[in-house]
Image (spheres, rainbow, N blue to C red):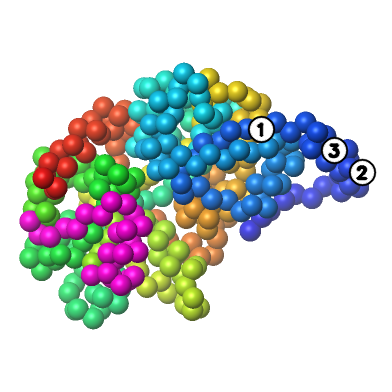
Amino acid sequence: MKRRTLSLIAAAALALPLAGYHSAAAAQELRVLVHSSFELPKPLLAKFEADAGIKLSIIKGGDAGEMLNKLILTRAKPIADVVYGLDNTLVGKALAAGVLDAYGGPAARRVAVPPLADGVIPVDYGFVTLNYDKAWFAKSALPLPRTLEDLAQPAYRNLLVVQNPATSSPGNAFLLATVAGLGEEAAFDWWGRMRANGVKVAKGWSEAYYTEFSRNGGSRPLVVSYASSPAAEVHFSKEKIIAAPTASLFLKGGVFRQVEGVALVKGGGQRAAAAKFIEFMRSGPVQEALQTSMWMFPAEPRTARHAVMRHAVEPGIFDSLGPEVIADKGSGWIERWIRVVLK
Protein backbone atom coordinates (compact mmCIF):
# COMPACT_ATOMS: atom_id res chain seq x y z
CA MET A 1 0.00 0.00 0.00
CA LYS A 2 2.96 2.34 0.36
CA ARG A 3 4.11 4.37 -2.59
CA ARG A 4 7.51 6.00 -2.83
CA THR A 5 9.29 7.78 -5.67
CA LEU A 6 12.73 6.24 -6.04
CA SER A 7 15.32 8.69 -7.31
CA LEU A 8 18.98 9.52 -6.80
CA ILE A 9 19.52 6.08 -5.29
CA ALA A 10 23.29 6.23 -5.25
CA ALA A 11 23.41 9.65 -3.61
CA ALA A 12 20.85 8.61 -1.03
CA ALA A 13 22.78 5.47 -0.22
CA LEU A 14 25.95 7.46 0.42
CA ALA A 15 24.05 9.84 2.69
CA LEU A 16 22.39 7.16 4.83
CA PRO A 17 25.11 6.62 7.46
CA LEU A 18 25.46 10.35 8.13
CA ALA A 19 21.70 10.91 8.11
CA GLY A 20 21.18 8.04 10.51
CA TYR A 21 23.82 9.43 12.88
CA HIS A 22 22.29 12.90 12.75
CA SER A 23 18.75 11.70 13.49
CA ALA A 24 19.89 9.53 16.36
CA ALA A 25 21.96 12.32 17.88
CA ALA A 26 19.57 15.22 17.41
CA ALA A 27 16.05 13.76 17.31
CA GLN A 28 13.48 16.15 18.74
CA GLU A 29 10.60 14.81 20.81
CA LEU A 30 7.24 15.81 19.39
CA ARG A 31 4.22 15.38 21.64
CA VAL A 32 1.23 14.28 19.55
CA LEU A 33 -2.18 14.11 21.20
CA VAL A 34 -4.54 11.67 19.46
CA HIS A 35 -7.90 10.04 20.11
CA SER A 36 -8.11 6.42 21.17
CA SER A 37 -8.86 5.21 17.61
CA PHE A 38 -5.60 6.56 16.18
CA GLU A 39 -3.66 3.79 14.53
CA LEU A 40 -1.06 3.79 11.77
CA PRO A 41 1.39 1.01 10.83
CA LYS A 42 4.43 1.06 13.13
CA PRO A 43 6.92 0.83 10.22
CA LEU A 44 5.33 3.92 8.68
CA LEU A 45 5.69 5.90 11.91
CA ALA A 46 9.26 4.65 12.37
CA LYS A 47 10.23 5.74 8.86
CA PHE A 48 8.82 9.20 9.51
CA GLU A 49 10.86 9.46 12.71
CA ALA A 50 14.04 8.41 10.91
CA ASP A 51 13.50 10.67 7.91
CA ALA A 52 12.47 13.73 9.94
CA GLY A 53 14.87 13.33 12.85
CA ILE A 54 11.91 13.36 15.22
CA LYS A 55 10.95 11.14 18.15
CA LEU A 56 7.18 10.84 18.37
CA SER A 57 5.55 10.78 21.77
CA ILE A 58 2.02 9.59 21.01
CA ILE A 59 -0.44 10.55 23.75
CA LYS A 60 -3.77 8.73 23.65
CA GLY A 61 -6.36 11.19 24.92
CA GLY A 62 -9.44 8.96 24.97
CA ASP A 63 -12.52 9.81 22.93
CA ALA A 64 -12.20 12.93 20.77
CA GLY A 65 -14.45 14.89 23.14
CA GLU A 66 -12.38 13.81 26.13
CA MET A 67 -9.24 14.79 24.23
CA LEU A 68 -10.58 18.29 23.64
CA ASN A 69 -11.48 18.66 27.30
CA LYS A 70 -7.88 17.80 28.21
CA LEU A 71 -6.60 20.47 25.84
CA ILE A 72 -8.91 23.04 27.40
CA LEU A 73 -8.01 22.09 30.97
CA THR A 74 -4.27 22.20 30.27
CA ARG A 75 -4.11 25.25 27.98
CA ALA A 76 -1.99 27.18 30.51
CA LYS A 77 0.61 24.40 30.23
CA PRO A 78 -0.12 22.42 27.05
CA ILE A 79 0.36 18.66 27.18
CA ALA A 80 1.01 18.38 23.42
CA ASP A 81 2.52 20.24 20.49
CA VAL A 82 0.15 18.97 17.82
CA VAL A 83 -3.25 17.27 17.96
CA TYR A 84 -4.91 14.84 15.58
CA GLY A 85 -8.53 13.70 15.67
CA LEU A 86 -10.60 16.79 16.42
CA ASP A 87 -13.51 16.63 14.00
CA ASN A 88 -16.17 19.00 12.71
CA THR A 89 -18.33 18.31 15.77
CA LEU A 90 -15.56 19.65 18.04
CA VAL A 91 -13.30 21.99 16.11
CA GLY A 92 -15.61 24.98 16.56
CA LYS A 93 -15.48 24.53 20.32
CA ALA A 94 -11.70 24.10 20.17
CA LEU A 95 -11.27 27.35 18.23
CA ALA A 96 -13.62 29.21 20.55
CA ALA A 97 -11.62 27.94 23.54
CA GLY A 98 -8.39 29.23 22.00
CA VAL A 99 -6.47 25.95 22.22
CA LEU A 100 -5.39 25.79 18.56
CA ASP A 101 -3.04 27.80 16.36
CA ALA A 102 -3.56 28.10 12.61
CA TYR A 103 -1.22 26.19 10.32
CA GLY A 104 -0.38 27.72 6.95
CA GLY A 105 2.10 25.28 5.40
CA PRO A 106 1.79 23.45 2.08
CA ALA A 107 -0.98 21.11 3.25
CA ALA A 108 -3.13 24.12 4.12
CA ARG A 109 -2.91 25.36 0.55
CA ARG A 110 -3.90 22.09 -1.12
CA VAL A 111 -7.47 21.13 -1.86
CA ALA A 112 -8.93 18.65 0.60
CA VAL A 113 -11.99 16.47 0.30
CA PRO A 114 -13.70 17.77 2.35
CA PRO A 115 -12.46 21.04 3.97
CA LEU A 116 -12.45 21.78 7.69
CA ALA A 117 -11.95 25.03 9.63
CA ASP A 118 -9.27 27.53 8.59
CA GLY A 119 -5.87 26.52 9.92
CA VAL A 120 -7.02 22.99 10.84
CA ILE A 121 -5.82 20.53 8.22
CA PRO A 122 -8.27 17.82 7.12
CA VAL A 123 -6.76 14.32 7.27
CA ASP A 124 -9.70 11.99 6.69
CA TYR A 125 -13.45 11.81 6.63
CA GLY A 126 -16.19 9.24 7.13
CA PHE A 127 -19.93 8.89 7.46
CA VAL A 128 -21.83 7.99 10.61
CA THR A 129 -24.93 6.15 9.48
CA LEU A 130 -27.10 3.11 10.14
CA ASN A 131 -25.73 -0.38 9.45
CA TYR A 132 -27.97 -3.42 9.16
CA ASP A 133 -27.47 -7.16 9.48
CA LYS A 134 -28.25 -8.63 6.06
CA ALA A 135 -28.88 -12.17 7.34
CA TRP A 136 -31.31 -11.01 10.04
CA PHE A 137 -33.44 -9.05 7.59
CA ALA A 138 -33.37 -11.84 5.00
CA LYS A 139 -34.56 -14.34 7.61
CA SER A 140 -37.25 -12.09 9.08
CA ALA A 141 -38.66 -10.97 5.71
CA LEU A 142 -39.15 -7.52 7.25
CA PRO A 143 -38.48 -4.83 4.63
CA LEU A 144 -35.65 -2.43 5.30
CA PRO A 145 -36.81 0.91 6.67
CA ARG A 146 -36.95 3.59 4.00
CA THR A 147 -37.17 6.58 6.37
CA LEU A 148 -36.39 7.36 9.98
CA GLU A 149 -40.15 7.59 10.48
CA ASP A 150 -40.42 3.89 9.63
CA LEU A 151 -38.20 3.10 12.61
CA ALA A 152 -40.74 4.66 14.96
CA GLN A 153 -43.45 2.24 13.75
CA PRO A 154 -44.43 -0.90 15.73
CA ALA A 155 -42.90 -3.28 13.13
CA TYR A 156 -39.43 -1.96 14.03
CA ARG A 157 -39.85 -1.98 17.79
CA ASN A 158 -36.71 -3.01 19.72
CA LEU A 159 -34.57 -3.26 16.55
CA LEU A 160 -32.25 -0.24 16.80
CA VAL A 161 -29.27 0.40 19.07
CA VAL A 162 -27.67 3.86 19.21
CA GLN A 163 -24.87 5.39 21.26
CA ASN A 164 -25.32 8.01 23.95
CA PRO A 165 -24.26 11.34 22.38
CA ALA A 166 -22.93 12.49 25.75
CA THR A 167 -20.33 9.70 25.79
CA SER A 168 -19.87 8.72 22.14
CA SER A 169 -18.66 10.54 19.03
CA PRO A 170 -20.80 8.51 16.59
CA GLY A 171 -23.75 8.89 18.95
CA ASN A 172 -23.33 12.66 18.92
CA ALA A 173 -22.88 12.69 15.13
CA PHE A 174 -26.09 10.72 14.65
CA LEU A 175 -27.98 13.11 16.93
CA LEU A 176 -26.64 16.04 14.89
CA ALA A 177 -27.71 14.31 11.67
CA THR A 178 -31.29 13.99 12.93
CA VAL A 179 -31.38 17.68 13.86
CA ALA A 180 -29.83 18.73 10.54
CA GLY A 181 -32.04 16.47 8.43
CA LEU A 182 -35.37 16.71 10.23
CA GLY A 183 -35.18 20.07 11.97
CA GLU A 184 -34.75 20.48 15.71
CA GLU A 185 -38.35 20.08 16.85
CA ALA A 186 -39.15 17.21 14.49
CA ALA A 187 -35.91 15.48 15.47
CA PHE A 188 -36.67 15.50 19.18
CA ASP A 189 -40.25 14.44 18.52
CA TRP A 190 -38.80 11.47 16.60
CA TRP A 191 -36.40 10.66 19.42
CA GLY A 192 -39.28 10.67 21.89
CA ARG A 193 -41.23 8.22 19.75
CA MET A 194 -38.12 6.07 19.34
CA ARG A 195 -37.84 5.84 23.10
CA ALA A 196 -41.42 4.58 23.20
CA ASN A 197 -40.56 2.15 20.39
CA GLY A 198 -37.74 0.52 22.33
CA VAL A 199 -34.54 2.15 21.05
CA LYS A 200 -31.55 0.77 22.95
CA VAL A 201 -28.88 3.20 24.16
CA ALA A 202 -25.28 2.02 24.54
CA LYS A 203 -22.48 4.00 26.15
CA GLY A 204 -20.18 3.76 23.14
CA TRP A 205 -19.63 2.27 19.69
CA SER A 206 -17.93 -0.94 20.84
CA GLU A 207 -20.77 -1.86 23.16
CA ALA A 208 -23.37 -1.10 20.50
CA TYR A 209 -21.59 -2.95 17.68
CA TYR A 210 -19.97 -5.88 19.42
CA THR A 211 -22.56 -6.58 22.14
CA GLU A 212 -25.98 -5.36 20.99
CA PHE A 213 -25.76 -5.73 17.19
CA SER A 214 -27.24 -9.02 15.94
CA ARG A 215 -24.28 -9.59 13.62
CA ASN A 216 -22.20 -10.16 16.76
CA GLY A 217 -24.70 -12.13 18.82
CA GLY A 218 -26.92 -9.33 20.08
CA SER A 219 -30.63 -8.82 19.43
CA ARG A 220 -30.56 -5.57 17.45
CA PRO A 221 -30.23 -5.82 13.64
CA LEU A 222 -29.84 -2.05 13.22
CA VAL A 223 -26.93 -0.10 14.72
CA VAL A 224 -25.44 3.37 14.41
CA SER A 225 -21.98 2.81 12.92
CA TYR A 226 -19.96 3.91 9.89
CA ALA A 227 -20.25 3.64 6.12
CA SER A 228 -16.85 1.91 6.22
CA SER A 229 -17.98 -0.80 8.67
CA PRO A 230 -19.05 -3.26 5.93
CA ALA A 231 -15.55 -3.03 4.42
CA ALA A 232 -14.01 -3.72 7.83
CA GLU A 233 -16.27 -6.78 8.18
CA VAL A 234 -14.80 -8.17 4.94
CA HIS A 235 -11.22 -7.24 5.85
CA PHE A 236 -11.29 -8.86 9.29
CA SER A 237 -13.41 -11.90 8.43
CA LYS A 238 -11.84 -15.19 9.56
CA GLU A 239 -13.16 -16.76 6.39
CA LYS A 240 -12.55 -15.38 2.91
CA ILE A 241 -15.73 -13.63 1.81
CA ILE A 242 -16.50 -11.56 -1.26
CA ALA A 243 -19.60 -9.78 0.04
CA ALA A 244 -20.04 -7.88 3.28
CA PRO A 245 -22.51 -9.40 5.79
CA THR A 246 -23.66 -5.90 6.70
CA ALA A 247 -24.59 -2.82 4.70
CA SER A 248 -25.36 0.84 5.26
CA LEU A 249 -28.73 2.57 5.22
CA PHE A 250 -28.57 6.15 4.02
CA LEU A 251 -31.79 7.65 5.34
CA LYS A 252 -32.71 11.33 5.38
CA GLY A 253 -31.66 12.68 8.78
CA GLY A 254 -29.55 9.62 9.48
CA VAL A 255 -26.20 10.35 7.80
CA PHE A 256 -23.51 12.66 9.17
CA ARG A 257 -20.21 13.42 7.45
CA GLN A 258 -17.41 13.44 10.01
CA VAL A 259 -14.17 15.23 9.07
CA GLU A 260 -11.06 14.72 11.21
CA GLY A 261 -8.07 17.03 11.18
CA VAL A 262 -4.64 17.79 12.57
CA ALA A 263 -3.69 21.11 14.14
CA LEU A 264 -1.06 22.97 16.09
CA VAL A 265 -1.70 23.23 19.82
CA LYS A 266 -1.60 26.84 21.02
CA GLY A 267 1.36 27.32 23.32
CA GLY A 268 2.96 24.06 22.24
CA GLY A 269 6.59 23.84 21.19
CA GLN A 270 8.58 22.16 18.41
CA ARG A 271 6.87 24.10 15.64
CA ALA A 272 9.18 22.85 12.88
CA ALA A 273 8.70 19.25 13.96
CA ALA A 274 4.94 19.77 14.30
CA ALA A 275 4.80 21.13 10.75
CA LYS A 276 6.58 18.02 9.47
CA PHE A 277 4.04 15.83 11.25
CA ILE A 278 1.10 17.75 9.78
CA GLU A 279 2.52 17.32 6.28
CA PHE A 280 3.17 13.64 7.04
CA MET A 281 -0.49 13.10 7.91
CA ARG A 282 -1.45 14.36 4.44
CA SER A 283 1.27 12.35 2.69
CA GLY A 284 0.43 9.54 0.24
CA PRO A 285 1.55 6.64 2.47
CA VAL A 286 -0.51 7.86 5.44
CA GLN A 287 -3.55 8.65 3.31
CA GLU A 288 -3.44 5.11 1.94
CA ALA A 289 -2.74 3.40 5.27
CA LEU A 290 -5.48 5.11 7.29
CA GLN A 291 -8.13 3.50 5.11
CA THR A 292 -7.56 0.08 6.69
CA SER A 293 -6.05 1.18 10.00
CA MET A 294 -8.62 3.78 11.03
CA TRP A 295 -11.31 2.93 8.44
CA MET A 296 -11.75 6.44 7.15
CA PHE A 297 -11.67 7.94 3.67
CA PRO A 298 -8.56 9.96 2.68
CA ALA A 299 -8.79 13.74 2.52
CA GLU A 300 -6.11 13.95 -0.19
CA PRO A 301 -8.20 13.74 -3.38
CA ARG A 302 -5.75 11.79 -5.56
CA THR A 303 -5.15 8.99 -3.06
CA ALA A 304 -5.65 5.46 -4.39
CA ARG A 305 -8.40 3.54 -2.61
CA HIS A 306 -7.67 0.20 -0.99
CA ALA A 307 -9.46 -2.62 -2.80
CA VAL A 308 -11.55 -3.57 0.25
CA MET A 309 -12.99 -0.07 0.38
CA ARG A 310 -15.26 -0.96 -2.53
CA HIS A 311 -17.48 -2.39 0.23
CA ALA A 312 -17.58 1.06 1.86
CA VAL A 313 -20.19 2.96 -0.12
CA GLU A 314 -20.08 6.74 0.19
CA PRO A 315 -23.56 8.27 0.46
CA GLY A 316 -24.64 10.78 -2.14
CA ILE A 317 -26.38 12.91 0.49
CA PHE A 318 -25.74 13.55 4.16
CA ASP A 319 -26.96 15.87 6.90
CA SER A 320 -24.29 17.91 8.63
CA LEU A 321 -24.03 21.25 10.39
CA GLY A 322 -21.29 23.89 10.46
CA PRO A 323 -18.73 23.85 13.31
CA GLU A 324 -20.00 27.21 14.57
CA VAL A 325 -23.58 25.97 14.89
CA ILE A 326 -22.44 22.81 16.65
CA ALA A 327 -20.24 24.80 19.04
CA ASP A 328 -23.15 27.12 19.82
CA LYS A 329 -25.98 24.62 20.18
CA GLY A 330 -24.48 21.14 20.39
CA SER A 331 -24.26 20.93 24.19
CA GLY A 332 -27.86 22.04 24.56
CA TRP A 333 -29.02 19.42 22.07
CA ILE A 334 -27.24 16.70 24.04
CA GLU A 335 -28.90 17.86 27.26
CA ARG A 336 -32.28 17.87 25.54
CA TRP A 337 -31.63 14.39 24.10
CA ILE A 338 -30.88 13.06 27.59
CA ARG A 339 -34.16 14.48 28.90
CA VAL A 340 -36.15 13.08 25.97
CA VAL A 341 -34.56 9.64 25.67
CA LEU A 342 -33.18 8.69 29.08
CA LYS A 343 -35.12 10.50 31.80
Which residue appears at 40% of the width and 43% of the height?
63
**What's the magenta region?**
196-219
Residue that mark 1 sits on: 29
Task: Give whichever of discs 1 and 3 has the lower sequence position.
Answer: 3
Q: Disc 2 residue type?
A: Leu
Which of 298 and 226 lies nearest the eye of the viewer? 226
Which residue appears at 68% of the width and 52% of the height?
43
Which of 174 and 254 lies nearest the eye of the viewer? 174
Q: Nearer the viewer, mark 2 or mark 1?
A: 1
The secondary structure type at the circle numbered 1 is strand
Q: Are marks 1 and 3 in contact (CB under 8 Å)?
A: no
Which labelled disc corresponds to residue 14? 2
Which labelled disc corresponds to residue 21? 3
**Is 201 colored magenta in this rendering?**
yes
Q: CA distance from mark 2 to mark 1?
A: 27 Å
Residue 51 shown left or right of residue 207 in the figure: right
The secondary structure type at the circle numbered 3 is helix
